[in-house]
Amino acid sequence: MKPHLKSAMLAAAQLTAAGDLQAATAAIRQALAGDRVAAPTAASKADSFASATPEVLRARMSRAAEAVQAALAEGLPSASLDTVMARASTPLDDRMVAGSFTASAGSRDYLLYLPGKARPSALVVMLHGCTQTAADFAAGTAMNEQADRHGFAVLYPAQSKVANRSACWNWFLPRDQRAGRGEPAIIAAMAREVAERHEIASERLFVAGLSAGGAMAAILGTAYPDLFAAIGVHSGLRAGAAHDLESALAAMKRGAAPANGSVARSASGGARKPLRTIVFHGRQDRTVHPSNARQVTEAALAAFPDDALGVREESGRSAGGRSFIRTVHADERGVPMVELWEVKGAGHAWSGGTRAGSHTDPLGPDASEAMAAFFLADPRRR
């Protein structure tokens, strides 16, 4: 980690211990912007520690993670809480069902969209980003339109504010990075239950997400390669990109440290299996560095045998005027196994999304359409 990020984390911890959460959040925000953070004065630190009981200090330090998570969430494009809640309260469709699921690892609420046809042909799990809700994410991505077009169901798990104050999936915590534990276990069990209830074939399950949700989708792919047939990572990070808040900040700022090959093995308990992966990222993303898109792509390609895939590069322009580069790695049948979409001029937002939801870029190529086409492209999965 760069010295200024390390000093920022130390300063944030000291400020939190002193009870100044606002200053702690500001310190992290300042570091993410590339500025250096001044450490609290020795006198102020001494005074704050001397006047606080051990119980107070423990309570303050337990809130340090909340301060950092809030700063991470503030890197997203601006959308007021009132705006997000208003969008979330708008009825989306009479085929959207709300529910709650409990597994041994915990509970989460969800929204489930069912297409008009009698039985869904597949299930796409969609994981929202920080500060978003399931309803907001459904509205912004318009994935339900793709569901109607192709006949699949869409499951929108909702992060609990108890688990993360900013509604981020905890992709940077070791307890939430492995099969059979934490949030991956909850989401995987939820997907299995929904698929069984609606008689969806086990090989027709897919997962995608934005930002923290994209990072969690990458984790689910490595943790449950026999459950999910393909994953979509939008503005996210590779599995194992971070193991705590320090490494999370560093990965978001300039990309994760080089992988040592043990990350995927530890996530699922065995060697990594090839997994079809589609990646979207804005080249002007100031929240999650664009280099992370390449890292997700490289991690996916590393699981395939050498020379197993051919590669082609295409360039284009969306209807909204965004230029993009699409790199496709396909097998001998021409079926895309790994795709990378790099959108020029786009920031940290769902490409081609609608203004009905937060954190979207309506000008970009339609990520929902591209992901749906990618997921359903493999004839072996039909």
Image (spheres, helix red, strand yellow):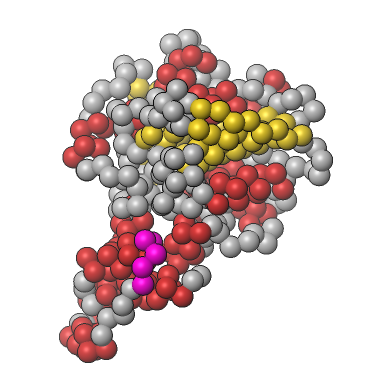
Quadrant including the C terminus: top right
Q: How many marks?
A: 0
Would you identify the image quadrant in which residue 101 lies? top left
Query: Which span is picked out in magenta?
Result: 32-36
Answer left or right for 47 relative to 342.
Answer: left
Answer left or right for 304 relative to 13.
Answer: right
Would you identify the image quadrant in which residue 306 lies? top right
Along the line of sight, the residue nearer the viewer: 291 or 167: 291
Asked whether the viewer can see residue 362, the reply is yes
Residue 224 at x, y = what percent? 61, 43
Which residue is at a point 43% across and 11% down the rendered structure image?
A: 116
Considering every residue shown, the one lying at the far top of the view is 117
Which residue is at a point 46% across and 32% down the rendered structure image?
A: 322
Answer left or right for 28 relative to 208.
Answer: left
Along the line of sight, the residue nearer the viewer: 325 or 206: 325
Which residue is at a point 38% across and 61% down the rendered structure image?
A: 32
Q: In this view, does 109 lie above or below 1?
A: above
33 within the magenta span = yes
Asked whether the viewer can see residue 276, the reply is no
Considering every residue shown, the one lying at the far right of the view is 307
Along the line of sight, the residue nearer the viewer: 337 or 202: 337
Along the line of sight, the residue nearer the viewer: 55 or 382: 382
Residue 320 at x, y = what percent? 41, 26
Residue 349 at x, y = what percent? 40, 39
Q: In this view, does 7 lie above or below 82?
A: below
360 within the magenta span = no
Which residue is at a point 82% across and 40% down the rendered structure image?
A: 307
- Main SS, magenta region, reads loop
